[in-house]
Structures are given as structure tokens and as C-alpha cells.
Image (cartoon, rainbow, N blue to C red):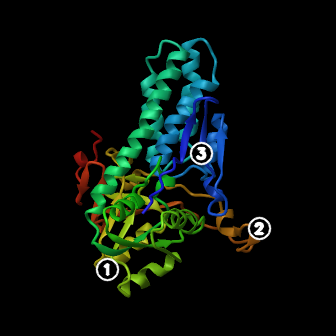
Amino acid sequence: MQINSDKTLFWDDKKNCIVFVRQTLLPAVYKTAECGTIEELAEAIRTLDIRGAPALGVAGGYGVALSTFVHDDGNIEGFMRLVSDDAKYLTSTRPTAINLSWGINRVFKAIEDADSPDDARRVALAEANAIAHEDEEMCRSIGRNGAELLPDKCTVLTHCNAGALACWTWGTALGVIRSAVEAGKDVSVISCETRPLNQGSRLTAWELARDKIPVKTITDSSAAFLMRKGMIDAVVVGADRITRDAVFNKIGTYTHAVSAKYHNIPFYVAAPYSTFDAVRLEKDIVIEERSRDELAFCGERQLMPDNVDALNYAFDATPMELVTAIVTEKGVLRPPIAKEDLTRK
């Protein structure tokens, strides 16, 4: 089987800009676009053209590199203040996902001792490229570690998109599935549509169909029914932040975890160490709330009365006691999770 591994975003050395896949156009159109300014990158992140925890880490790193190229203040102190302002601005675009700030902070820290703007540009781009290449190695390792957990023949439920489009390539949750298939296992996938923006039906199903991995899309509310019917053998999802007591992922994940626990189905989380937050607990995390319009409209069609408000949380928190295991690039962690388990090494 041919497994595709296109890059979700990358740096264009000739134009000194970020090139990314326009994910909001999928599955109808596959198209790339360029980010030549910090404002354009922030808009791509806010509108979810660039999304997914590991991909946001890569985007954050390249964002700092981009900032060093768009500013030409010859004074290193003034230059660094401008880059720092851009870093803070980018961090604010997605408050729940920790990888974005992790990538931004890593590259900014690498240039703190730069002697000149040119030196900062060289170091920032090298560090951002390192994050991207490490992301691919990380996803491959997560895939290998997670594939061992799946039966030789199984049907896996996944929620949202934790595939190549959510990373630099390969994927975390879908990386587990891809690696299992590559190892010769007979894996089929149930992809939840993931309302309201349908990342499961638009992105996950598109990725798997392109790789010729059997996939069926369901409404989010069908999952428990299929579990009861014995049609799901395991659940594998990604994560946007992991604390000692909870896993933060796309809204709806908690529902699947409760249902999986009740039906004695293993619930696996596939995520890199860059997603771990060793400092905070669930109560400390701000859950992003998105626009009412995402619920009120489907294209131009109105789905809600004008006088009805909405709660549109982007993420939920799954208590750690509902998680069977967390698959990382360093191995498999099983709850309870100690603080030292979340320390990046």
C-alpha cells in the first residue's frame, strides 16, 4: 500500500515565507497558500487553515523565523522587541493548544543571544527546520509504538483529525493507524464527522481514502451506538494539551471516552511530549470558545434563529481515569500520570 506523506507546511527558501495547505478548502480542493506576514500566519491559524497540535508547533517555530525576516531594524535590541511582540501575538491565537507556544518559545529562546538580525534569522530558521524534521521522526515513533497496541484485525474509531494534516507529516492518531497498516495489520477506521467544522469527514476521511485505508464517516452521536453493537475495537485520538489529570482534545472526545469506558473498549491518546503540560492542571486551562457563526450557518444556509445564542467550545477535557494509555514518541504511558512523566527530556 502506498502511504502518502505530503508536508502540511514548509519554509520557502526563495521567497522567505511559509507555505501551507489550505485545509478549509478540503476535501473539494487541494491548494497551498503563502504566509509572508505575521498577520497572515495568525489569520491562517485562527481560521484553522493551519491546525492540529504538532502542526501548530511547527507553525509557531516558523512564525518566529518569519518575524525575523519581516523586520529590518538594524539595532538588535529594537529588532528583538519586535520579534517578541510578534511571538506574543501569535501565541494568543489559540490559547488551549500548548504546542503553538512551545514552538514559538523554543525558537525565540534560540535567538535570544543573537549578535545581529542576520544572526537571528539564521538561527531561527535552523531551529524551526529542526522542529519540523523532529516532528516527522516523532510521529513515526508514535506510530510504531501505538501500532503494537492494535489487534491484527480491528476497527478503530477516531475523532477530529490527528493525521498528516495536523502535523508536519504522517500524523499522531492516524500515524498509529498508518503504521499498523504498514506493519501488515488489517485496520479499518470509523471517522467521526466532528461538528461543527467537520474535520473528521473533511480531513481524516480524505487522508485515509487517499491512502486506501478503509474508512467510514459517522455522525458524532453514533459512536456509542456502534460501540454497543460491537463494531469498534479501539478508540485512538490525538491531543492538544495533556496535564497530569486530563487530556484536552477536540470537543466530543470526552463523550467517546465515557462511552468506551462503559463498553470496555481501550481508549488511546497519541501525542508527543511537546503536548504535555507538567505545570498546570485541568482547572488552570482556558478552553477556547469559537464563533457562534460556526454553529449558526453551514455555508450560506442558516441553521439557528437569530435570537438564539450558542456555546461553541473548541475543546473538552477527558479525565485521565478514562484513558487506557498515552502513546508518545518515547513509549507508552499508562495512568495514573506522575508529574515527572510529563517532563520533556
Image quarter hosting the C terminus = top left
Work out whether 28 lies above or below 79: below
Q: Are marks 1 and 3 in contact (CB under 8 Å)?
A: no
Q: Residue at x 46, y 42 (%)?
A: 57
Amino acid type of the residue tagged 3 in the rendering: Phe
Using the numbered discs, state the Cα–Cα distance from disc 2 to disc 3 in whole angstroms. 26 Å
Q: Is residue 59 visible?
A: yes
Say left or right for 301 vs 126. right
Q: Residue at x 33, y 75 (%)?
A: 154
The one of 226 and 83 positioned closer to us in this rendering: 226
Using the numbered discs, state the Cα–Cα distance from disc 2 to disc 1 in whole angstroms. 39 Å
Total labels: the figure holds 3
Q: Quadrant of residue 16?
A: top right
On residue 312, which mark appears?
A: none
The residue singled out by tag 2 in the image is 300
The residue singled out by tag 3 in the image is 20
SS label for mark 3: strand
Can you give x and y, in whole percent of width and height, for residue 172 in the image? 40, 55
SS label for mark 1: helix
Q: Quadrant of residue 66?
A: top right
The one of 282 and 129 positioned closer to us in this rendering: 129
Mark 2 Cα-neighbour bin, 10 Å: few <14, some 14–19, many ≥20? few
Using the numbered discs, state the Cα–Cα distance from disc 1 to disc 3 in whole angstroms. 40 Å
